[in-house]
Image (cartoon, rainbow, N blue to C red):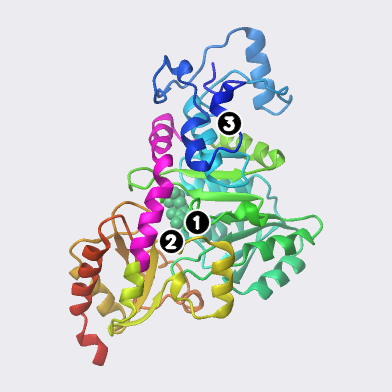
Amino acid sequence: MSDKPAQAPPSRRAAGDHPSTAVLTRGFDPHLSVGSARPAVFRSSTYVFSSPESAERAFAIVTGREEPAPGETPELIYSRFNHPNAEILEDQIVPLEEGSEWAVVFNSGMAAIMTALMSRLAPGDAIVHTVPLYGGTQHLMHKLLEPWGVVCRPVVSGRGQELDEAIRTTPRLKFVLIETPANPTMAMTDIKRATLTAAQVDPRPIVMVDNTFLGPAFQHPMTLGADLIVYSATKYLGGFSDLLAGVVLGADPELERPIRALRGLFGNILQPDECWILDGRLPTVSLRMNRQSKNAQRIAEALVRRPEIRKVYYPTLFDDPEQIRIRLAQTDYPGAMIAFDLHGGKPAAFEFLRALKLAHNAVSLGGMETLVCHPKSTTHSGNTPEEHAIAGITDGLVRISVGVEDWRDLLRDFEQALDTVQAFVTA
Ligand SMILES: *Cc1c(COP(=O)(O)O)cnc(C)c1O
């Protein structure tokens, strides 16, 4: 059995449903969960076939030897390939990402990124990517892809001309991987410009965007021409810092098939319980992100006045005209990540962290609770000194993921912690 009916009742599929409606109405038929208003959790590892012929057909389809007929729903086989809770989650996540047609869910963001890349790379192929990248993605390139003969060519975030140049001149280019805004300084890369440049290259490389920081609420890469979008759903999609998950989304079914097939081999599909939990978080992603972004903007714009801070990094505080142009063109709201550089370097940053009373000193982001970390000694500690310099990761840099608490309480907490590092200003 499958929880995805071949033909959903028309009332559940009204054309033109907005994302906040569609996320609650599609992908789930209560009649397949004994009438339950919320999906059941199907924890079974294996599925009973209705006949040996349907088993044969399901295997032919899952291995790619045969194509499903229009409207055909192949029977489920074994949960490493697929299971109802993954199908429900995948159907419900699609309307949140404007322009996407399919989603594939994974047991972490890293699993999603690795599987998407490996689905099309062979030794000798190349990736052009923005830097800084998420530390795990950077490590994946250095520890696995490069030793296997994949060329990884970095371009500093926001340098549009250098990115164009790299896309045009890199032989056997298979992927352009863009992480925007960049972590932690929020430097933005023009997605549309990169997709237009990629379209001029033959064969055309796949433009893949890590949309973890601003998606799905505030940045819509598919509408700008991206081919694949990856998420660490551990962050805003999950929203409560209590699960690990990843998603790849796209529109072209030719891109989906090898990713799904490789997920079946790697065994990195998201487990049924996690799918069910994440599913319940989707309807509130936009509500949470809007609140978090409003909180962050108020806090960031108030912190600018503090003498202990050398510079605040936040999209509404950009001063470079090109960065301002990209922000206005491709993002709806500035998001909930703030970074700032303290006078007094590492001792000041550590003292600030120690003095916090409400916000926690932790890595990760996107949760309901406010988290603060020191990137140079934690999330970005694997980078070289040159990479730190290029990315603006100084000894005094602190990164904040703003939660949904009352912003006035958070600001007061940051201000009292800044009071404790006043001595560093003149030092
Ligand atoms: C956290 C993160 C990842 C990795 O996701 P996991 O769920 O931790 O595997 C990838 N990219 C970005 C931008 C992230 O913040």
* Residue drawn where x is 68% and y is 17% of the image: 57
Q: Nearer the viewer, residue 395 or 160?
A: 160
- Quadrant the C terminus occupies: bottom left
In the image, what residue occupies the spot 46% across and 77% down?
Answer: 392
Q: Report the magenta stretch's main SS.
A: helix
Label 1 Cα neighbours within 10 Å, binned few <14 / some 14-19 / many ≥20 = some
Near mark 3 (Cα within 10 A), the count class, few <14, some 14-19 or many ≥20, is few
Above or below 73: residue 254: below
Q: Measured along the vertical axis of the image, is residue 181 above or below residue 63? A: below
- Looking at the image, residue 310 sits to the left or right of residue 258; the answer is left
Q: Residues within 10 Å of mark 2 (few under 14, many from 20)?
A: many
Of labels 1 and 2, earlier in sequence is: 1
Q: Which residue is mark 2?
A: 335
Element at badge 2?
A: loop
- Can you tell which quarter of the image residue 261 is in? top right
Question: Which labelled disc corresponds to residue 218?
Answer: 1
Q: Residues under labels 3 and 2: Cα distance?
A: 31 Å
Mark positioned earlier in the residue sequence (3 or 2): 3
Q: Which mark is residue 14?
A: 3
Residue 200 drawn at (x, y percent) = 79, 62
Is residue 289 visible to us here? Answer: yes
Determine the residue positioned at 35% across, 74% down.
301
The one nearer the camera, 344 or 194, is 194
> What amino acid type is highlighted by mark number 3?
Ala
- Amino acid at dot 2: Gly
Q: Residue furthest bottom?
A: 426
Q: CA distance from mark 1 to mark 2?
A: 7 Å
| Magenta range | 268-297
